[in-house]
Image (tube, rainbow, N blue to C red):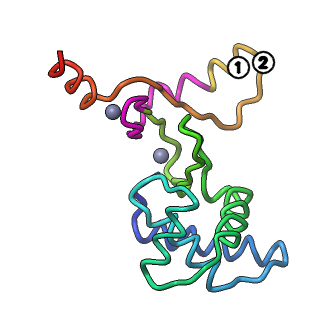
Amino acid sequence: MAHLTSAEAADLLERFRHYLREHRLPVTQQRDLIATAIFTAPDHLTAAAVHQRLARQGKRIGIATVYRTLDLLVESGLIRLHEFGDGFRRYEGAAPQGSHGHLVCGVCGGVEEFTNERLERMLPIIADEHHFRYRTHRVELHGTCRACQQRTLEGL
Ligand SMILES: [Zn+2]
Ligand SMILES: [Zn+2]
């Protein structure tokens, strides 16, 4: 989720360190910084945006290290990878309270999040009807956001 509390971010970081130790990978300050940049981000970040955020904080970390660490974070299940159709890969911390859907605007590229309990309840039922063993899901709606609809109206 794009707005994790600091306690949730701290919990995810602890789980990432645990994951690294379990896989006999070194727990480094650089990995901590990259993970924290994603966990505390207010938005869905690209690898380049993570790199820039850290550079602004005065942390010099190579872009290759950023990519490798993001791959590890995705493998660990602690961050999610999204491709919203603009050719960029974006990342966000995995919310402990469950999943959320995305509304992707094709005009401005903005991404809004939503949660919907009815939808969450429906998906396992649909899976059941198809004798499909449900594990997880991704919901992404593509269209035009409210602001862009208004701009179009005003332009007429
Ligand atoms: Zn999101
Ligand atoms: Zn828009």
Indicate left or right for 139 with 112 as reference: right
Amino acid type, label 1: Asp
Q: Is residue 33 above or below residue 131?
A: below
State the image coordinates of residue 77 (x, y, percent, origin top left).
Answer: 68, 55
Q: Is residue 108 left or right of residue 34?
A: left
Give the labeled residue for mark 2: 131
Q: How many marks?
A: 2
Nearest the eye: 47 or 79: 47
What residue is at 71 percent from the left and 37 percent from the top? Answer: 135
Residue 25 colored in magenta in the image? no
Number of the label disc, if any, that sits on residue 117: none
Q: Who's the residue at 38% across and 30% down the image? A: 107
Q: Label 1 to label 2, Cα distance in Å?
A: 5 Å
Would residue 32 appear left or right of 109 to someone viewing this image?
Answer: right
**Element at label 1:** helix
Question: Marks 2 and 1: in contact by CB < 8 Å?
Answer: yes
Ligand 1 neighbours mark 2 (CB distance < 8 Å): no
Crowding at label 1, few (<14), some or many (≥20) Cα neighbours within 10 Å?
few
Q: Is 119 in front, or is 20? A: 20
Identify residue for label 1. Answer: 128
Residue closest to the far front: 155
The x, y position of residue 104, in whole percent, is 44, 33
Secondary structure of residue under mark 2: loop
Amino acid bearing label 2: His
Ligand 2 visible in quadrant: top left
95 to 6, vertically: above or below = above
Residue at the location (42% across, 54% down)? 43
**Quadrant location of residue 151?**
top left
User: Residue farthest to the right?
Assistant: 24
Q: In the rendered image, which quarter is residue 128 located in?
A: top right
For image coordinates 49% across by 50% down, the residue present is: 97
Q: Which residues are magenta?
A: 105-123
